[in-house]
Amino acid sequence: MQAARTLLSLLLAVPFLVPGQSEEGIPVSDQLVLAKCAVCHPVDDHGNMQRISWERATPEGWEEALKRMIRANRVILTPPEARAIVKYLSASHGLAPEESKPVMYYVERRVHDETGLANETLLDTCAKCHALGRALSWRRSTAEWKEFAEGHLAHYKLQMNEETLAFLARVAPLHTPEWAVWSARPHTPDLTGRWLVTATSTPASRTDLHHSRTRSSLPLRHQASVPVSPAPPW
């Protein structure tokens, strides 16, 4: 009995959730994410959550992933909870501006020639069903790219392409110098001071603003100096 207890304690002391992961994960600290996601994504002693700690993505990528979890796994979330989860993951497990800029065409639904992004084999693997920018909107560890690919290929009845896997692990790794700099910045910027706010409006009629009967569609430009306290109203 004592031997069994000793063995059980040793098993519990060993991180069990990420076999094959050799890269440091990004711990999850948000209580809402832990409460809603830990049922399927266990957390280890370092705060790493299975799969999630080895992924980064754009806000649109996390929103799409959350919708998929709701449909497939019946995750129950209120709209404010869903927005809060996407906001946290986009900030703590997101992309640096230098990483997201090259794939903004995908999230903005703009036409973009992807010919120069990869060779024909790689384009045929991903772009057969969706833009390559969709895959490049994510960053994953090498082991996580492999697990993602295995699940993806099993679902869509495809064959593993080692060249594609190596390409994604190389050009979209979990840890990058850009992310190291961006994630180290203060998460709450200091907005104290005075801000010049500029807006442009197009009135339907000058009558509203100048008490004139002459109609006009010319845009009007407004400016205001707004003081901001340490706790901004927005």
Image (cartoon, helix red, strand yellow):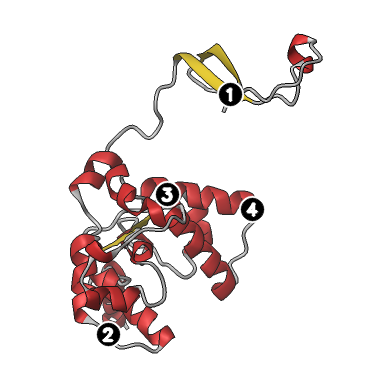
Mark 4 residue type: Pro
Q: Which is closer to the viewer, label 2 or label 1?
A: 1
The residue singled out by tag 2 in the image is 160
Camera sees residue 19: no
Give the number of the mark in front: 2 or 4. Answer: 2
Please state which of residues 115 and 99 is positioned toward the viewer in this rendering.
Answer: 115
Residue 82 percent coordinates (x, y): 57, 54
* C-alpha span from label 1 to label 4: 31 Å
Q: Are marks 2 and 1 in contact (CB under 8 Å)?
A: no
Calculate the distance from the C-alpha at mark 3 to the C-alpha at mark 4.
16 Å
Q: Quadrant of the C terminus?
A: top right
Residue 138, x across and y down, in percent = 34, 60
Q: Which residue is mark 3?
A: 90
Image position of 230 (left or right of 43): right
- The answer to whether 184 is drawn above or below residue 190 in the figure is below
Q: Mark 2 and mark 4: span between their CA atoms?
A: 37 Å
What amino acid is at disc 2? Met
Q: Nearer the viewer, mark 1 or mark 3?
A: 1
Q: Which mark is residue 79?
A: 4
- Disc 2 element: loop
Distance from Cα at disc 2 to Cα at disc 1: 53 Å
The residue at the point 20 percent across, 51 percent down is: 176
Give the class, few, some or many, for how many residues have Cα within 10 Å of label 3's Cα (few <14, many ≥20): some
Kindly indicate whether the residue at mark 4 contacts the one at mark 1 (C-beta within 8 angstroms).
no
Q: Earlier in the sequence, mark 3 or mark 4?
A: 4
Which residue is disc 1 drawn over?
200
Q: CA distance from mark 2 to mark 3?
A: 29 Å
Mark yes or no: residue 214 visible: yes
